[in-house]
Amino acid sequence: MAWTDERVELLKTLWAEGLSAAQIANKMGGVTRNAVIGKVHRLGLSGRATPAKPQRGRVTAPEPREEVSAPSAAPRQLSKPSAQEPEFIAPLVLDSGDPTTVSTIKNNMCKWPIGDPAKDDFHFCGQPTLSGKSYCAYHAHMAFQPPQQRRSERRPEQRRVLAKPERKRAVG
């Protein structure tokens, strides 16, 4: 399918009306949703006059809006999650005076490793776990962070950029 001037103008009009790429593809015929998205991108039509129309039968709740305040002189700090970090509790020492090891750990004990597994003093936290979990509250807080928090804590140099592999050309 070739993009004629008439079809491009129709695409621009339908896009400005707020139709989705799938709706535009259906109205135009002979073009896929992905072709519409590609052409919109190449034409630079990212802005819309109106938001996309919701499909019939679907009810969506309006998104809560954040209040915008005047910028302050001090830079804004990212807010920490509302859940406070649990208090550290020292690893459990068994009645025998030994730390929790592979041979003494039970299902309801924290399996957070402490030390080097190649050394003789390697052991586990051993504190009681949250119901059905592998770690106590303190170590679960360390092990499981919300995805947004992990992404925001990464520095740009820590993000990996995958380069496209170079193609080898056949000589001949």
Image (spheres, rainbow, N blue to C red):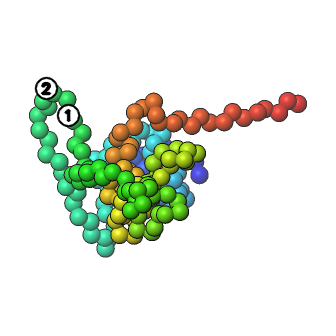
Name the residue tied to disc 2.
Answer: 73
Q: Which residue sits at x=50%, y=49%?
A: 122
- Quick one: which residue is furthest to the front in this view? 96
Q: Is residue 92 left or right of residue 49?
A: right
Q: Nearer the viewer, residue 19 or 3?
A: 19
Say if 45 sits above or below 170 in the image: below
Q: Nearer the viewer, residue 56 or 83?
A: 83
Q: Amino acid at mark 2?
A: Ala
Q: Which mark is residue 76?
A: 1
Q: Which residue sits at x=44%, y=45%?
A: 40
| Mark 1–mark 2 CB contact (< 8 Å) | no
Q: Nearer the viewer, residue 94 or 27?
A: 94
Q: Is residue 54 visible?
A: yes
Q: Nearer the viewer, residue 19 or 121?
A: 121
Rate crowding at label 1 as few (under 14), some (14 to 19) or many (20 or more) other CA atoms within 10 Å.
few
Helix, strand or loop for disc 1: loop
Q: What is the CA distance from the residue labelled 1 to the residue labelled 2? A: 9 Å
Where residue 108 sits in the image (x, y, percent)? 40, 68
Q: Amino acid at mark 1?
A: Arg
Where residue 136 sits in the image (x, y, percent)? 35, 59
